[in-house]
Image (tube, rainbow, N blue to C red):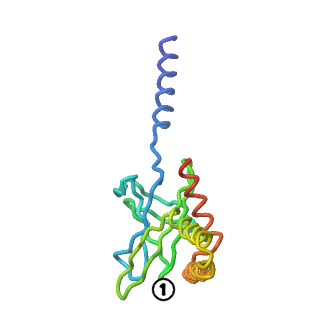
Amino acid sequence: MKKLLLFFYLTIATGSLAFADTVSVAINHFVVKENPFAQDEVAIVATDSLENIQSNVNGQFTFTINGFEEILKFDKGVAFYDHKLERSSFIYAKHVNDNGTHSILYYVYKGTDKLSCIHISWIVLLAVPLCLILLGYMFKRFIIIAVIIFAIFLYFNHHNGLSIPTFFESIIDGLKSIF
């Protein structure tokens, strides 16, 4: 009787351990690229830290793209963002999972027949205003020119879809990734 009870106990224990060994794939790195199958659309590609495509990422994942929550369906590491781009603009994509918040800012330049996705680092976003402030402080005659350049910088960002809250959010997310 003891052997039979031990057998049932071990069978139940190994059965529950088999279910505990499932692997869930998390997206920790991703890039934005031109969608090769549709014109004026982009694709989000799940990558590793070396930007190799993670083909084992399949399923639906929630992303926030330019402030709007989207559920993207990944198939072999690639999800297509089904919104057409009318003109060149910024794309700020953010994904939250158990490992933290992962966000990235791209400037998508719309050419005549293709899109060029340019990664914008949070360091560049922080460096441009700081350099203008530093130059204005160092050269008193440069203050008016620095203010004009800064106004053009803000207008360019706002006109292409990068609002002030998104600007600061991308800088804060970049600083969080350091720590």
In the rendered view, tell whether residue 60 sits above or below residue 15.
below
Q: In front here: 83 or 145?
A: 145
Quadrant assignment, res 140? bottom right
* 143 left or right, relative to 13: right
Q: In front here: 22 or 87?
A: 87
- Residue drawn 48% across and 86% down? 87
In the rendered view, tell whether residue 63 sits above or below residue 99.
below
- Residue drawn 50% across and 66% down? 124
Quadrant assignment, res 53? bottom left
Mark 1 is surrounded, within 10 Å at the Cα level, by few (under 14), some (14 to 19) or many (20 or more) other residues, namely few
Q: Position of residue 110 (x, y in %)?
A: 42, 83
Outermost residue, bottom side = 112
Q: Position of residue 26 (x, y in %)?
A: 48, 51
Q: Position of residue 55 (x, y in %)?
A: 35, 56
- Residue drawn 45% across and 34% down? 18
- What's the residue type where badge 1 is placed? Arg
| Label 1 residue SS | loop
Outermost residue, top side = 2
Q: Position of residue 27 (x, y in %)?
A: 47, 54
Count of number-bearing discs:
1
* 52 left or right, relative to 163: left
- Residue drawn 52% across and 21% down? 9
**Residue position for label 1:** 87
